[in-house]
Amino acid sequence: MAEKKDTRRRTLTEARKAANKRYIDKFVEVKVRMTPERRTEVQQHAQEMEESATAFINRAIDETMARDQKSKKK
């Protein structure tokens, strides 16, 4: 038997809008250009690692920077 999908929409309260804005204001956006195929690869890999594409990209940056610092000290 098919499940019924809840089609009710929640209204966005002013308090929620303000909280969302405070959260978003803590970050900046960085654009990265890649082909659609590459984006799909990144998204698929992130999903396989059970993380968002953003979390994967940030982890990749962190690990690379740590590795670069380590090799720089040698």
Image (tube, rainbow, N blue to C red):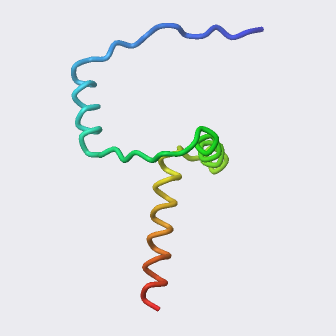
Q: How many marks?
A: 0
Give the residue drawn at x 45%, y 73%. Answer: 66
Using the image, determine if residue 62 lies above or below residue 40: below
| Percent of width and height locating residue 49 | 63, 51
Left or right: residue 48 compared with residue 8: right
Using the image, determine if residue 59 lies above or below residue 40: below
| Percent of width and height locating residue 33 | 48, 45
- Residue 25, quarter of the rendered image: top left
Left or right: residue 61 compared with residue 47: left
Using the image, determine if residue 21 lies above or below residue 30: above
- Residue 43, quarter of the rendered image: top right
Left or right: residue 57 compared with residue 30: right
| Percent of width and height locating residue 69 | 43, 79
Work out which residue is located at the far right of the displayed protein and give it.
1
Give the residue drawn at x 27%, y 25%. Answer: 16
- Residue 10, quarter of the rendered image: top left
Q: Quadrant of the N terminus?
A: top right
Give the residue drawn at x 46%, y 55%. Answer: 58
Work out which residue is located at the far bottom of the displayed protein and give it.
74
Give the residue drawn at x 53%, y 44%. Answer: 52
Of residues 74 and 47, which is closer to you in this image? 74
| Percent of width and height locating residue 24 | 29, 38
